Image (tube, grey):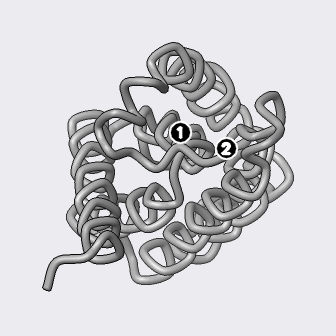
Amino acid sequence: MITKTNDRKVMMMAQAALIAAVYVALTLPFAPIAYGPVQFRVSEALTILPYFTPAAIPGVTLGCFLSNFLMGAPLPDIVFGTLATFIGAVFTYRLRGHRYLAWTPPVVANALIIPWVLKFAYDVPDLVSFMMLTVGLGEVLAVGVLGNMLLAALEKCKNLLFHMGGSVSR
């Protein structure tokens, strides 16, 4: 029996899968600048999407996991890089009522976690504090600039999202 609850679950799974696929598609072609102490991961702009839908939490998390796995990242990067993205997504969702703060959780989570991954998984000799600055700056550009541009564009067409069965919730 098909119910509204089943329809909603299927819609959420489809949204999460689509977001994961787009995340991977935006990471792999830009791999040379998406990894390392100075990184700019275009796909991180998608971490703003939990502002609109909880389906984006598993979506960006799975996308990050798959990107790191497919690029042959060491296990600590696969685990803790994915964890940083998950934490950022969860807190972005929690800040969905605060448009101008919603972009900050992915920046903070990645700036605090990824430098340790770089230090111990990749043996990057730079100071952790320096890498917090460089990774944080890359996140500010990806999420703060690109992510907020995406947020603004999606807010303009949120009625379309409602009519398509999206779960824009606020």
In the depicted structure, whether residue 157 falls above or below residue 38: above
Q: CB under 8 Å between callouts 1 and 2? A: yes
List the residue tagged with mark 2.
135
Q: Position of residue 156 (x, y in %)?
A: 52, 13
Q: Is residue 39 left or right of residue 15?
A: right
Q: Position of residue 158 (x, y in %)?
A: 48, 26
Q: Is residue 110 left or right of residue 85?
A: right
Badge 1 or badge 2: first in the primary sequence: 1
In the depicted structure, whether residue 43 falls above or below residue 12: above
Callout 2 amino acid: Val
Mark 1 burial class by Cα count in 10 Å: few <14, some 14-19, many 20+: some
List the residue tagged with mark 1.
39
Mark 2 burial class by Cα count in 10 Å: few <14, some 14-19, many 20+: many
Name the element at disc 1.
loop
Residue at figure coordinates x 59%, y 17% from the top left = 152
Name the element at disc 2.
helix
Q: Position of residue 133 (x, y in %)?
A: 80, 41
Residue 70 quadrant: bottom left
